[in-house]
Image (cartoon, grey):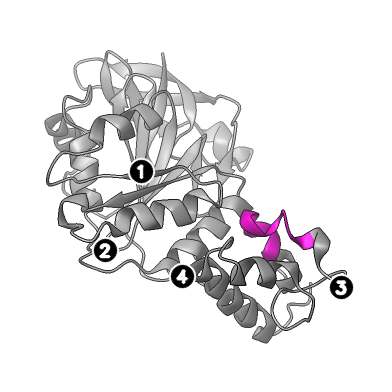
Amino acid sequence: MRGKIIKGIAGFYYVHVPGRGIYECKAKGIFRKEQVRPLVGDDVEIDLLGEAEKTGNIRALMPRSSQLVRPAVANVDQALVIFSITHPQPNFNLLDRFLVMMKQQKLPCIICLNKLDLDKEGKGRDYADIYGAGGYPVLTASAAGKQGIESLKEMLKGRTTTVAGPSGVGKSSLVNCLQSGTVMETGEISAKIERGRHTTRHSELIALDEDTYILDTPGFSSLGLFDLEKEQLAAYYPEFRGYEASCRFGGCTHTAEPGCAVKQALEQGRISRLRYENYCQLYEELKARKPVYR
């Protein structure tokens, strides 16, 4: 049988087989011998040991289309990052850090702005315009009011999506909304995974449909600096791209140089000041970082 690893704990791998359920599996010794570690998200072939007990052995890993380092997961197609429009106020510097990190891993990113029901000032539209100008798909939603849920499901359909966001933004509520009517019942997960020694918080794939999965990752409150040189940072701000060629100096950092077309576009309102200030802050952090000698 073929399935997808949805969770791995203490040498046990839980494999979702569409239409049949979740199987608790061990990896055969050949993986240790070849120093290959199965990952959450891996498509695998399993040998059935017991249908009643739903146990088996992983006998083969299918080729991976992608592999992320953080979180350690295979075959992810895109990232969904969830922030709130208000309550709490969004930390856009943190959002930019996440977008840089995902782009480094060549992963397309969808931005979901939650708590639309509390947005009395229409800030969600402004934020969507700012990040839409950077080329990111942006969706406003409300988990409490069930707004935007169907549109979000459509953006996830047929893909494996890693979901992340800081605490307090309603990430868990949105994930719960996405799971309504899911093919993988929560009771089945509880019975198979949340037992005794298997209660540690790990990344977990949740099946929304037979070919649609989300990876629920722990919330984050900070992201460190990236393995990135300060001169490379501007490439992670697509809004700058149309202006950089007109800068007076080659290799312009868009911070202090005269004749900078990016800063001119900023003053003319064609580049978001919020995004530009985040860029400058990240640039200064990278500039102050001690060089790493390899």
Can you say whether 18 is above or below 208 in the image?
A: above
Q: Quadrant of residue 208?
A: top left
Of marks 2 and 4, the one in the foreground: 4
Q: Tell me the quadrant of the picture where the C terminus can be found.
A: bottom right
In primary-sequence order, the first of circles 2 and 3 is 2
Residue tagged 4: 93
Can you say whether 105 is above or below 177 in the image?
A: below
**Residue depicted at 74% across the width and 81% down the height:** 291
**Residue depicted at 75% across the width and 74% down the height:** 253
Amino acid of disc 1 = Leu
Residue 224 percent coordinates (x, y): 51, 72
Residue 31 placement, left or right of 264: left
Residue tagged 1: 139
Of marks 1 and 2, the one in the foreground: 1
Residue tagged 3: 249
Residue 199 placement, left or right of 239: left
Residue tagged 2: 167
Q: Mark 2 packing: few (<14 Cα in 10 Å), some, or many (20+)? A: some
In primary-sequence order, the first of circles 1 and 3 is 1
Secondary element under disc 2, as helix, strand or loop, is: loop
Q: Separation of disc 2 and disc 4 at Cα?
A: 15 Å
In the rendered image, residue 199 lying in the magenta stretch gets the answer no
